Amino acid sequence: MIFSTGIHIQTKGNTEVIDITSQVADRVRESGAKDGTVTVFVPGSTAGVSTIEYEGGLVADIHSVWERIAPREIPYRHDAAWGDGNGHSHIRSFLLGPSLVVPFVNRRLTLGTWQQIVLVDFDNRPRSRDIVVQIMGD
């Protein structure tokens, strides 16, 4: 069986890290599937999905790391072409990736004790995000 649904989120942008674990777990339970996998996918090219230990210090560290990897202040050709100032957002999204697959057993995500599913919005402005959640299982 395949069950497709979604999660709608308003973001602040600027590398905001949002814990979406409970929403994904809810969608798995709603699907009726007992065992399988859930794919979480964010359409667009300025956000990504991953897992982390969602803890304030680590979230702050993630912001610092992204500033070192793809700083906002350096010139990007994308900015010159479009003038929207979010070249760094596209690079960060490219490096993180737009999707994640998580197995579930007995309708429960098989995440580690300190592991949460997060959406990271890298854009330089608030956004309305529609995350695709697709469950495959039986």
Image: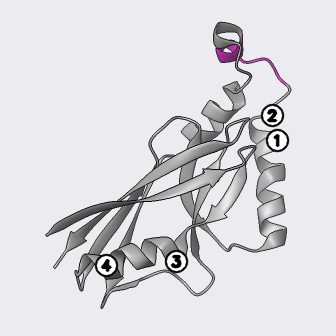
Q: Is residue 109 above or below residue 57?
A: below
In front of the other: label 2 or label 4?
4
Q: Distance between the residues labelled 3 and 1?
A: 30 Å
In magenta, the rendered stretch is 74-79
Q: In which quarter of the image is the N terminus?
A: bottom left
What sort of colour scheme is used for the picture? one colour
Q: Which of marks 3 and 1 is nearer the N terminus?
A: 3
Q: In this view, does 96 lie above or below 71?
A: below
For badge 1, the amino acid type reads Arg
Exactly how many numbered labels are in the figure? 4
Q: Where is residue 86 in the image (x, y as percent from the top left)?
A: 70, 27
| Viewer-side residue, 125 vs 102 | 125
Give the residue at x 22% y 80%: 33
Q: Earlier in the sequence, mark 4 or mark 3?
A: 3
Please identify the quarter of the rendering in which residue 66 is found.
top right
Residue at the bottom extreme of this rendering: 106
Q: Name the residue tied to disc 1.
A: 68
In front of the other: label 2 or label 3?
3
**Callouts 4 and 3 close, C-beta under 8 Å:** no
Relative placement, left or right, of 11 versus 59 is left
Give the residue at x 49% y 56%: 8
Q: How far apart are marks 1 and 4 (CA)?
A: 40 Å
Q: Distance between the residues labelled 2 and 4?
A: 40 Å
Q: Where is residue 90 in the image (x, y as percent from the top left)?
A: 61, 31
Q: Name the residue tied to disc 3.
A: 22
- Residue 96 in view here: no
Q: How far apart are marks 4 and 3 (CA)?
A: 12 Å
Q: Name the residue tied to disc 4.
A: 30
Q: What element carries label 1?
A: helix
**Callouts 1 and 2 close, C-beta under 8 Å:** yes
Give the residue at x 65% y 62%: 18
